[in-house]
Image: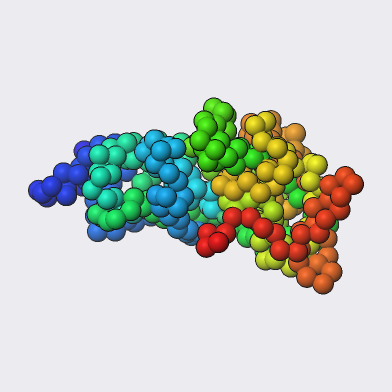
Amino acid sequence: MTHLAMGDGAEFDRIRALLSHFGTQAAGIGDDAAVLSIPTGEQLIASVDVAVEAVHFRAEWLAPDEIAWRAMHAALSDLAAMGATPRGVLLSWTLPPDRLQWLDAIAAGSAAAARAAEVPIVGGNLSRGDTLTLGTTVMGSAVHPVSRAGAQVGDRCYVTGRLGGPQAALRAWLAGAQPSAAARERFAHPVARLREGRWLAGAGATAMIDISDGLLADAGHLAAASGVSLAITSALVPVHPDSVHADALRSGEEYELFITAPLIDCAQFERELGTTLTAVGEVRHAEGGPRVRFDTPGDVSRVDSPRGHDHFS
Ligand SMILES: [Mg+2]
């Protein structure tokens, strides 16, 4: 018995079924609230994210376990961007009656995602509602959380991974086609860059943000928060094999990291983490307002208001 015993009733039967999927990943669950231990000297870091059917995903594109995986790693990605170690996740799910048969697969996907991130599921809530909605609250800790506001003039800019895969998958689906296996995998199974974020924090990252709205937009958020300008050489931005350059700059839901830091050994990063790290630009004085300037050979364009994904557009 890894969970606290519960009383009788259909609702508790459903929760018992969920817990059988979670297994030891949810050991100790079942009290009124979760108690988390944070190592002495570390700060609690918390974030919440929500995945709504027809807004963030379409049921015909992904299997329910993939929807659940994606929801959890999208939420954990915000902890990665702080350089944090995840300590616990809380799940808040709303299911319409015609999605109840997905519950087992959603639980299995969440359990697999939590196991991969080595984070316990410490509590949750289940409700009936009109739209399938997966809410995920993530809690982590770090000695020195890395904010998006710390970029220093003279730092270099880096990005993890190769960008454009999720956009390539979306383009295929929206055109009524099937994406390549690699692009589909980037959309269906993003992996929060938690180890990478901690490594980069330890290597002196001055600012980090995860790429959820697209590199153009998220670099803009970091520049604005830090009060600096970023000079990015577009040709250096690493492009996913199934994508093209223009898409890689705007592709959202990448869950890769954009980082500013003094010189980082990219080869050492790749050796130790198995993920690519690419230098793409540098941090400059704001000169009349924070902005991101993307230079492409033969075309120097200044992007004052970076456009990326806008949830309300
Ligand atoms: Mg974020």
Residue at left offset 75%, top offset 64%: 304
Q: Please name the colour scheme applied to the rendered image.
A: rainbow
Question: At 84% from the left edge and 47% from the top edge, which residue is drawn?
Answer: 296
Q: Which residue is at the far top? A: 181
Q: Position of residue 283 (x, y in %)?
A: 80, 57
Looking at the picture, tell me which residue is in the foreground, 10 or 180.
Answer: 180
Q: Position of residue 13 (x, y in %)?
A: 16, 44
- Residue 88, can we see it? no
Q: Residue at x 83, y 55 (%)?
A: 301
**Which is nearer the eye, 75 or 145?**
75
Q: Position of residue 263 (x, y in %)?
A: 80, 47
Q: Is residue 32 above or below residue 108?
A: below
The front one of 163 and 109 is: 163
Relative to 277, 20 lies left or right: left
* Picture layout, residue 271 above or below residue 52: above
> Horizontal placement of 1 versus 49: left or right?
left
> What residue appears at the point 65 percent right and 32 percent down from the top-left corner?
242
